[in-house]
Image (cartoon, rainbow, N blue to C red):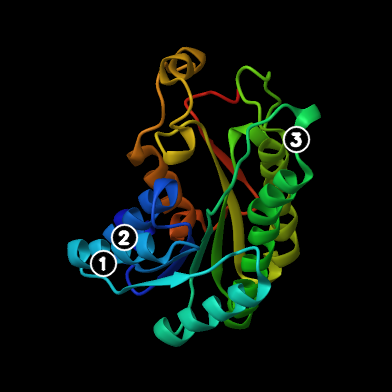
Amino acid sequence: MTRNLFDLNGRTALITGGGGGLGQIIAEAFAEYGANVAICSRKIEICQEAASSLKEKYGVETAAYKCNIANEEEVLETVNAVLSDFGQIDILVNNSGATWGENAEDMPLGAWKKVMDVNITGTFLMSKAVGKHMISRGYGKIINIGSIAGLRAKAADELNAIGYSTSKAAVHHFTKDLARKWIGYGVYVNGIAPGIFETKMSKHMDEEALRKRNPMGRTGDPNSLKGAALLLAGDASNFITGQILAVDGGGSL
């Protein structure tokens, strides 16, 4: 009975940036618990590879789509394609992200705009497009991937990417505000603020230093993220909306 709270059989999830990193971890969790999975990003090849692997391993329906989430036309085309292929979208994970490391006083405007376009504008555009479908059905779960970088300010020697941290703080507030706006439509909107996990985005960081800074003395493991995502995607979170769940080993404390 308890497992039913996390059972995703018969549901379809759309995950942006689901071909690698945190998005791939979440996609695998959903597939393992029975969800059909649609994956999109600008790099269609890695999405196709991930989708094929999930279908073979878990026997669920999967598909891959090429999409620049900062482009509204591409977002609409992708959402329509997913609806045509699967018939519905029950879960949306806004995971695609960009970062740029630079001193605040030297940050190029183009870099700032790129980070904002992907991290917050892309989250808005995808939520808007999928949200209309969810509102029409009276049900949906949206999970926005933020960051502990958006929960507290950090010194430059710990994180020197002011555009990234600012955009993630915006994602957190967007999550709360959208949850309040759509609470009457049966659409749940929550966020996950991960700490440091071993991904492509974190490879350039000093892992030993990161572990020393973390209260638990380690980086995040895939199962920790899977558990949080399953909670917010399934019936276990039917009385939770507008919340930001930090999965960070106490790093945001």
Q: Which residue is mark 2?
A: 50
Q: Amino acid at mark 1?
A: Ser
Measuring 41% from the left and 31% from the top, which residue is drawn there?
220
* Residue 176 visible to the viewer: no
What SS does tag 1 mark? helix
- Which residue is disc 3 drawn over? 107
Report, in whole angstroms, how far the alpha carbon at label 2 lies from the one at label 3: 34 Å
Nearest the eye: 114 or 19: 114
Is residue 141 or residue 210 the one in the foreground?
Answer: 210
Q: Given this view, does label 2 or label 3 mark the residue nearer the observer? A: 3
Residue 225, disc:
none
Q: Which residue is mark 1?
A: 52
Residue type at mark 3 is Met
Residue 76, percent from left and from top: 61, 78
Evaluate if marks 1 and 2 touch, with contact meaning CB atoms under 8 Å apart.
yes
Most foreground residue, 70 or 214: 70
Location of residue 171 in the rendering, given as x and y in whole percent from the top left corner: 68, 49
x 41%, y 84%: residue: 85
Q: Earlier in the sequence, mark 2 or mark 3?
A: 2
Badge 3 marks a residue whose secondary structure is loop
Do callouts 2 and 3 mark residues in contact (Cβ within 8 Å)? no
Q: Earlier in the sequence, mark 3 or mark 1?
A: 1
**In the displayed structure image, the side of residue 4 where residue 162 appears, left or right:** right
Cα distance in 3D space between marks 3 and 1: 39 Å
